[in-house]
Amino acid sequence: MPRYPYVLFDLDGTLADTGEGVMNCAKHACKTLGYPEPPQSELDKIIGPSLGYSFPNYLGVKKEDTLDAIRIFRERYAVEGLLESEIYPGIADLLSHLKAAGCRLFVATCKPTAYSETILKNLGVADKFDLIVGSNLDNTRTEKIEVLDYLCKTAGIEPERCVMIGDRYSDVRGAKAFAMGSIGVTFGYGTREELEAEAATFIADSPADIENFILD
């Protein structure tokens, strides 16, 4: 029997490398609003957290300009950015193996649901998931805790029987809020130190590590 019957995946930095599209759109938004191009060290931090948090906290955008920055970001992302994504090697096999073992699979991301569905369809893995839940385009349900709450209630699953897989602190914190297990991945945009500091249940260096932990 799998260690967890319900497996929840973050998207950015976990299922796929979406960094190029996200960063390009963030730079475009900053430039359009007259802000200097953010340094790469700050751009690396925006993969995962909500745009409403990332623009003022990492990219130097004033709070009063944040909604405009998100709007400009999404105008480019809807046309170009969501195509600038690549599935991580080993992920497709991982999803197939987990499903074959009887796990139910879900996506829990701060990226808008509509964009997430399109990306996963383009990558050929959308049909692996029972439900894909992200934020809303009206800037509601933007935090990981809100996404997880909505997903569990909508799918009718018990949080304590779930594991949340993600590459950032917000994934681990969200899991803790619902007494879920958590797997931090080091092949995304977070660091091992970040995941250890949040006391992730397990840290995986590859999709194979995830499979071995859940199915062992």
Image (tube, helix red, strand yellow):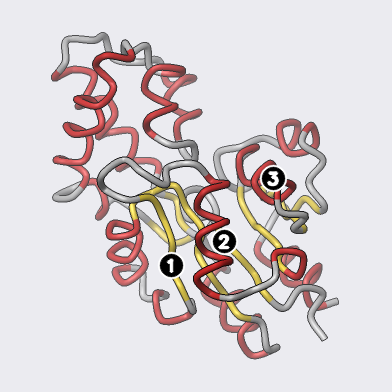
Mark 1 neighbour density, 10 Å: few (under 14) some (14–19) many (20 or more):
many
Q: Earlier in the sequence, mark 1 or mark 2?
A: 2
Corner quadrant of residue 27: top left
Label 2: state its secondary structure. Answer: strand
Q: Are marks 2 and 3 in contact (CB under 8 Å)?
A: no
The kind of residue on which mark 1 rests is Ile
What distance separates the C-alpha of mark 2 from that of mark 3? 11 Å
Q: Give the side of residue 211 with respect to residue 65, left or right.
A: right
Q: Residue at x 44, y 47 (%)?
A: 110
- Taking depth in this image into account, of 139 and 108 the one nearest to the observer is 139
Q: Position of residue 194 (x, y in %)?
A: 71, 32
Label 3: few (<14), some (14–19) or many (≥20) C-alpha neighbours in 10 Å: many
Q: Which residue is mark 1?
A: 132
Q: Which residue is mark 3?
A: 172
* Front-most of residues 161 and 182: 161
The mark that comes first in sequence, 3 or 1, is 1
Going by the picture, which residue comes out furthest to the right? 216
The kind of residue tagged 2 is: Phe
* Residue 125 in the image, given as x and y percentages of width and height: 42, 75
Give the tally of numbered discs.
3
Specify the quadrant that holds the C terminus.
bottom right
The residue that label 2 is drawn on is 9
- Asked which secondary structure carries label 1, the reply is strand
Q: Is residue 182 above or below residue 63?
A: below
Q: Position of residue 78 (x, y in %)?
A: 18, 50
